[in-house]
Structure formats: structure tokens, C-alpha cells
Image: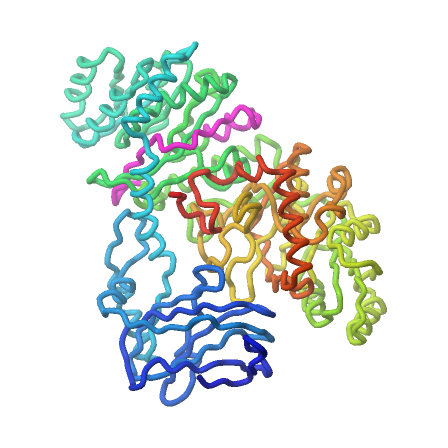
Amino acid sequence: MAAHDVAPEGDHWRATGKDPFLVFRISDKPVWGAFVFELEIDTIAGRLHPRLYIQAGGQWSQDASVVMRRVGVGYYKIHAFVAAPINAVRLDPAESECAFRVRRFAARPVKFSTFFARVMRGGQNQGHEKPNPSRLVAAMRQVARSGFAFETLKQASKRAQMAQVYQEWIAAYDYSAPMAASVHGRLERLKARPKFSVLMPTYNTPPKILDEAIQSVCDQIYDNWELCIADDCSPGDWMRPALEKWMSKDSRIKVVFREVNGHIAEATNSAFEIATGEYVALMDHDDVLRPHALAEVALALAEHPNAQLIYSDEDKIDDEGRRFDPYFKPEWNPQLLLSQNYFNHLTVHTADNIRSVGGWRKDFNGSQDYDINLRIAAHLGTHDVIHIPKILYHWRATKDSAAGDSRQKNYAIVNAEKALADFLSVQGIKANIEEVAGTTWHRVKYAMPDEPPTVSLIIPTHNQHKVLQVCIDSIVEKTTYPNYEILVVDNNSNDPESLAYFSELEDGGKVRLLRYPHPFNYSAINNFAVRHAKGSLVALVNNDIEVITPDWLTEMVALALRPGIGCVGAKLYYPNDTIQHAGIVLGIGGVAGHSHKYFDRDATGYFGRLKLAQNVSAVTGACLLVRKSIYESVGGLDEDNLKVAFNDVDFCLRVMEAGYSNAFTPFAELYHHESLSRGTEDNPEKRARFEREVTYMLSKWGPQLARDPHYSPHLTLRREDFSINID
């Protein structure tokens, strides 16, 4: 093994120059073809960002290189096709100062068919991946250009894996015969058996699909229901006989035949006119209810008798009845509802609420359910909305349906935006609505007050003047928010260059310098600075943050000023444009973990979670904005028990406990060079302190950490990737 700009140091390597790399011999003779390259490596110091090179034309070329994919702690992997014969590869461990220990590096040949099968897999959302010839062409062009092709659609392969995992989940946890006995037993003990009116507008529904939909209602193990069908003047001559046949089979099936086609909103109103149930469930004419759907709603109502809106998880089915793409939803999340109609299927309302808002409005066809959800939810509190974390509904996905491609019904997208605009107007909320690029979802841009409040940006630091300068310069040069102050808190810096830079900042009037001459205690440092802050809002900002979007602070302030909002967090990237923070999920890794960590910058995330503003349980203190009054009312950060780690999570949980909701916005984007100042837990004293803080968090917040309301119990707590939990 050859080395450049690195030197051995005990059992590890340390970079000695600006271009550190190792060269690994992978074969005694030149080889070519498809390979899997694997790297197991420990970080001793710095931040690793492994990149793999092959020689092109006798030279190490950036064009013939690829960043290795992190697939676990200290474990990296990449599939690659090498067109030109080689016997060695080059590994660059990082792009900056570092120390590392290579535990294993391997190059394993794989079959051509295996590699190209990965290349050919496209980004379909079906439970089976479809070939994508354009991906093969792109890969071949890459080979022709550089002699090196690699897997670039990580998400496509993940979807294929998730499809298989979902089938395993269905086999292990979905509704089955043994579960049916338990549900029947609970139903028999119900004191109240509410009546459900299932509303189903129909129009030229294919006979087989219509029969499957109606049969799924008839198969309900809970029997106090009625199916209210409104046929919207279907021209197909099979519709009336088919529906009349079903009416003759079951007296609970009621049909109204409309004489004029009025589209889905008016047809739904017609179905509602013949409904007599206390609760109303909405069902499309081509979808399928799970047999226990209404039973689970009845049981939920027994537990929450004051609930007024109930929704469940759902998945999709294709024309062959294959299940895929489950949506395991969060609990009540009002910010997410302003971004997407995440209630979707199955949703159940009280009949009284539907009457009180006047039913479905014909001007919102295609998004009529989103419109009525918004209008009803506007009058509900947190405890009025109940989520059932079970798959109760199969949404049929065909090539022409919204489930198959949500962009099929363009009028629905327009009407969804119109419904949202109307909701905001009625609520007296001044805001603009934008479509999130490449999606059918929405961004709400709240208007700022005529006099934007002062924000105090608090930046603790210890030496590291070059890191701090990047942070300060990016704030001053890029931030468009007009009213802020910067407080740099010097925690025992002793580097002459750093001290000179601090003096320069003070002389230039850019910042106020506060000195905290005590041992490092992140919580105490920030509490000290908040006491000196002039702003009515305070932002905790790490010294290794770098601004990307100029309106980052405007976006965060606008959200923080919303009634009921507590802490607001931003979308943070590592310098290699992968996700560092997109909200915090409680319970991951035992205490908490960052949502979608290491996902690509442009990734959509789990059902849009990387693209949409939403409520979360906690956000990182690396870039956290909150009203100063809230900060002080909950006692600030815990400087006694959480001096370094988890103080942000604890603070956010106390803010929630005080009655506020925390939020994440993806529209405030910044780089985070993570913990360059604090370093890693790399000695016994630090590790012991970290373990004490973990123990404290578990003892104080154990039940909350075990069940994050904004994260489904069916998703894993082992990783940050929102994959399905089959443990």
C-alpha cells in the first residue's frame, strides 16, 4: 500500500498535507469489470469524506472518482464498473485535516448482470422495479467518458429494498386471523356502537374494480355501517344494474342516481344527503377498505369519545392487487397539513362537522377532501384529531390515477392551492403560497410584520477563528433579514490569531463580543448570552454554520412568530451536500437522532418530509430560533445536567411541555461543519460525561423518547432513514 500526505501514527494514519490518500493494490494483474468496493474506517480526528479514484490515462482524475456511500457507522460502500484494466485504486479519506484507522478495504468482483440490474432499476414507486433503459445509457456514457460508472440512484435501490421489507412487515404485523379474534373480542365489549356512513361517489367505474370496492365494505367485521353511493350520471350502461344488484344484496347499501353530472364534490354531497350515521368515512370508488377498518375506528372512538376527525395509515395496490408504498403517518401535524393533505385515506369526520361547514365545495373538485379537511381542522384542537397507526385503506394506483402519479390531475393541484389560500384568508393569515418545485405540495410563506423584530444570533466559540470567520462573513454578506445582532461568546480562546480576529470584529462594529471565562458548558454559555441579548427572538448558532439561502432568517422568524410555535429549526447540510439535520426524531439510537441524516441534498425524503415545513418534536441547537420569552419561561438550556449533549432535545421537549409546537423548515438552508469546535467524544472523560447525559435523558424523558408523535411506530429507531421497522 502506497501513501501520500499521510503518515502512520500508532495504529492509525494522520494527514500531513493537503492531499492525503492511500493506494490499495486490488490484484496482482490488471482487472476490469463490475465491482463492489467496501471500506471500514474509524474517525480519529476531523471529518471523513471518502472518495475512490481509478487511473484514467495513467492519471488520477476527478472524472474517474466517486464519493463512497455511507451505509453504516464507519462503513462505506459503492458499486462501480471499471472499463479499463487496473490493479490498484486510490482512496482519499477526507478533504481536510484528519486522522483515521482503516479496518478493512475490499474490492469484490460482481457479475455484469448484478451491476447493470442496479443501473437499470428506475425510480418507480411500485412494489416491483421497472427497467429504465435511460439509466443504462447514462451509465454507458459515464463509462465512455471516464472509464468508471457508479450507482447514482441510491433512492431507487432503497425503494426496491423497502418493497421487500414491506412484504415482510405485512407477514409479521398486518391484520391476520389471530388478530381478528382479538378485534372481535374488543368489539363485543364496546358500550357504544356508532354508525358509520361510508360515502362513495361513482362514475363509470370498471365492473371488477367497483365490485372489489363495495365488497370490501361488506366484508367489514364491524357491522353498524351504511354505504351511501352517489352515481354521478355515469354514461356506462353497466353502472345502474350493477349498483341495483348490490342494493338488493344488502339493505345497508343505498344509492342515489344523479340525473346531471356534477363532478366529485357534488356527487359526494349527494351521497351525504342520504347518510344517517353519526360519523362519515370517505372512500373512492376504485379503492379497498381493510376488513377491520371501521372496527378500528369504532375502537379508537371508544378510547377517545370526543374525537372529531380520525385518520389512518394507508398503502397502495396495483391492478393485480399487490400492496406497496405504505404511508406510516405522524400524529396530528398542523404544519404538515398546510404542505400536503397527509390525512388522505382513511379519513373519518363527524357528520355534524360536515354539516357545519356546508359540505363539499364544487369549486375545489379534485381537492375537495383537502378543502373540507382544512375547513374542519381549523376548528379542532390537538385532542380532537386522532391518528390510527394501522393500514386501513388500499389506494388503487393505476397509470391514470392520482395514486399512480400525483401529477395526473393538474386541476386538483390548482384547486389544492386555492383551498389552502382560502383557508389562510379565512383565518386572517397573511401569506403567499408557492408550489414546492417538482412536487404537488405547497410552501406557505408567511408575511413579516411591518417592523421585523430584532433577532439575537448567539455564536459560542473557542479559538477556530477561520471557522468562525466563514460563519460571520456568510451571515453578514448573505442574510437579507434586516434586523439582527450577532453575539460572539468567547469561551477561553487563547490562540493569538483568534484573539486578533475578535478585536477586529469588535472594531468593525459587526458583532458584540461576550467573554465567558469558565470551563466549556454549552448550555451555560448560551444561557449567559441570552441574558445579554437585545432581541425579542434568539437564535442559537454554531460557529461552524455557513449560510446558503439569503432568506434563511426571514423564513425562520416568520414561522417562529406564528401562534403556538416554539422552536424552529433549519435544514443543515454537510459540506458534501448530504443532510446533517432535518428535524430530530425521538428514540433513534436510544435518545434521539437527526431525520434523514446523510440523504442527498435534493432528496424528497419520506413522503416529502425533506421538502416540507412540518412540526417536529425537536430541532438541533446548531441553528435554533425561538422567542426569548419562551426561552426564559422554560428556564433555558439545562446547564447542570446537560452541559454538552442533548441539551437542545431536552429544551425542545420542555417547550412542548409548556404547550408549544416545534417546527422544521426546509426553506432555511445552511451548511454545518459539525462540531469542529467541540470535537468528538474521543477520551474516557468525555465518554463518561456523554453516558451520564444519556442516562439523564432516559430517566427524565423515557416515555416521550419511546414514542415520538411525529414519527410512526412502524418506522425503525435503529437508523435515521425512515425505513420500516421489522424487528
Measured from the top left, where is residue 370 in percent x and y?
44, 33
Residue lying farthest bottom?
58
How many discs mark residues in the rendered view?
0
Measured from the top left, where is residue 133 in percent x and y?
24, 63
Q: Which picture quadrant has residue 372?
A: top left
Measured from the top left, where is residue 353 in percent x and y?
48, 19
Left or right position of 10 against 77:
right
Tell me if residue 451 can be seen. Answer: no
**Magenta run includes residue 677:** no
**Magenta run includes residue 389:** yes
Left or right position of 357 against 623:
left
Residue lying at 67% horizontally and 38% vertically, measured from the top left = 655
Left or right position of 639 against 596:
right
Specify the quadrant that holds the N terminus: bottom left
Please give the range of residues in magenta: 372-401
Tell me if residue 362 can be seen. Answer: yes
